[in-house]
Image (cartoon, coloured by chain):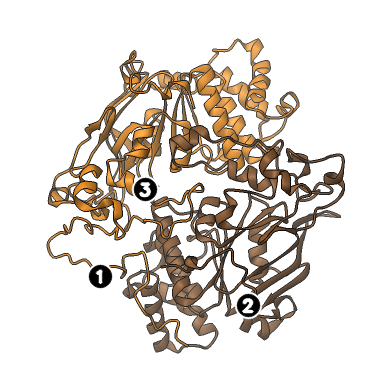
Chain colours: A orange, B brown
Amino acid sequence: MSADSGGMGQMPGSGSPLLEVKGLSTHFFTEDGEVRAVRDVSFQLYPGETLGIVGESGCGKSVTALSILRLVQRPGKVVSGQILFHGRDLLELSREEMRRVRGRDIAMIFQDPLSALNPVLRIGYQVDEAMHAHDKVPRNQVAARSVHLLDTVRVPDASRRVRDYPHQFSGGMRQRAMIAMGLANRPELLIADEPTTALDVTVQAQILDLLREMNRETGTSIILITHNLGVVAGLCSRVIVMYAGEIVEEGPIEQIFENPQHPYTWALLRSIPRIDFARHDRLRSIEGLPPDLIALPRGCKFHPRCPFRVERCLTDEPSLQTVKGGQRAACWVTMKRAYEEMGAADIIDTRPGAASGVHPPGFTLPPFGAADGGGPTGPSEVAAP
Amino acid sequence: MTSSVVPVSAPAATDAPLLRVIDVVKHFSAGVGATVKAVDGVSFDIRPGETLGLVGESGCGKSTLGRLITRLLPVTSGQILFDGVDLTALRGEHLRQQRKQLQIIFQDPFASLDPRMTIGDIIGEPLVNFGLAGRHEKDRRVQELLRVVGLNPYFNNRYPHEFSGGQRQRIGIARALALRPKLIVCDEPVSALDVSIQAQIVNLLEDLQAEFHLTYLFIAHDLSVVRHISDRVLVMYLGKLVEIAPSDVLYQSQQHPYTRALLSAIPVPDPRVESQRRLIHLSGEIPSPLHPPSGCRFHPRCPIAEAPGICSEVEPPMEQKTPGRFAACHFSDRVVTEVG
């Protein structure tokens, strides 16, 4: 963990942000309708910070990253907002100016290194190319730096293996080569989109170690995008939780994990088994499915799955409010109230509205244990001989 | 709620194993003179009603083992006794009839359902195949199965693309249940799903086990999920089992250095635990199963190996180290104190 983890409270005040995303919305204009993938997302990243963006498939975390680098492809489009990097709006840059930012000031590494590497070019050539593209590293030093970079990311026997092709590398080594390319021009910001998801757990641990070390030694800021809460807990100092295209909660890592205030964050943390816990009886699942981004529900986007919803959640959309120093949540109820008034500590029934008793007009909650997606319906004839 | 309340470490001496895997080997030919030793002499039992977890990293042979047990692949050598019947010796109709008892759930809920069949036909196909239901009876049974897995029974005329990943996995589970099997091999059943959906499916599998007295072989690379659902856990490395342990003691103490390294690499969703967690670095990468190392296959990466020496020369047998705990390591008593 980086040394700043203790003093995170002061961090946002110190200096000016490296990256400031303001009111970012990115939509996809498909035949079926307008998919509102990212809606009104705002956050700041300070130099040297490690920020995690977590959420499930379709929550908008990857589209947020692609929007920052202006890599959203048609039919997608950034429809509003600003992306200020050192105070300069990246959305205002010409294509050529933007090309110079990518890979030099902001680098990105992807989940699948095999599809991000060119299969017919040698690894060394591809790392060289990243430096030639920007001329930040003197030409006569490029080849030596490629070997040095591969060595730094612990590719064994780097001086020989620069001549290998991607298929000669294992999955973990390819991801290391990607990181080497990302670091080639000493970027100020590295965006890592699910960098370890395709890797085995022992290799994942090595890659995370590498990112942690890189952040500590070169001060490179990191935005880590992942669905894995354990990975965020190990690497990041601050975390943003996204749901259905919006930020639902953000704050310092310890606070979010120990005292989440948004019911989605709370539920997510309780739905995963932990290796260090004695076996518990049953996982607390989140019932239902995330909403359709074309036809979003009214009010809070999580209310159709939330056990703690109140009347207001069905109609009014909550915005991010400070709940504790540096921690903000977009919720009318918040877990503080859910614990105090709705018995959240002992809740077993996690179906929507179960703890608050609030349901839309005309909606009847079936008896607990039936068709909630969590279990079978009582005695059944299926097993009968 | 779940059958997990049964003390898992108690020796189930009275229960005859439902499945006995005896020295099973699977070699794949990889060109002239080369063989991939995907599964290389694996033995274990599964007791009736238990969930046996099987973990290991990519390429360790765990999925191949699952396919051997369900006879989707033939073994190279060894025996697989199911209820005392050797599946490897069965052919034709005898094998087909045995298959009713043994079903499998696959990882990819998109690839494992035929996109041109309705849900009703997918789930009902096994019933028709075995002549267990006419058209009318089939529809009734399919609707029951849909209800059992938490889906709307009237979805039987829909197609797979109309369902989400988690719902498709429920359909795959319903299909596996159709023939009332005794054993279900779950091959990475939740790894393609989002975390909130994973919990729904894990809970469903536990409920179904309690209700229908199912036995599971639960194969996954995610040790946190495996440990949660399993009574005992098998750890596999490069085609061999290295450790067998009750899941509730596995995190506290390990008898094999690989198990210990694997556990040390698992991130915990708790920043305070994470800041204390120490990764046990393994040198190098998993060797090729074309040319597995001599002696103990883990020795080139093992922090406590005596190599050259016993570890590089003698293959350690799988032995009971303490009651209920088995490991294949010459120095299992040194693992907890000296590894990491």
Q: Which residue is mark 2?
A: B14
Query: How many C-alpha atoms fall within 10 Å of the one at disc 1: few (<14), some, or many (≥20)?
Result: few
Of B340 and A9, the residue lying toward us: B340
Pinpoint residue B203: horizontal percent, then vertical percent: 42, 62
* Amino acid marked by disc 2: Thr
Residue visible at 52% across and 17% down? A218
Residue visible at 42% across and 84% down? B138
Pinpoint residue A133: horizontal percent, then vertical percent: 54, 19
Of A5 and A197, the residue lying toward us: A5
Residue visible at 40% across and 38% down? A62
Badge 2: chain ID: B
Residue A111's tag is none
Name the side, left or right, on which A125 lies relative to A379: right
* Residue B337 image-quadrant placement: top right
Name the side, left or right, on which B234 lies relative to A58: right
Specify whether disc 2 shares its chain with disc 1. Answer: no
Label 2–label 3 contact, CB within 8 A: no
Q: Secondary structure at mark 3?
A: helix
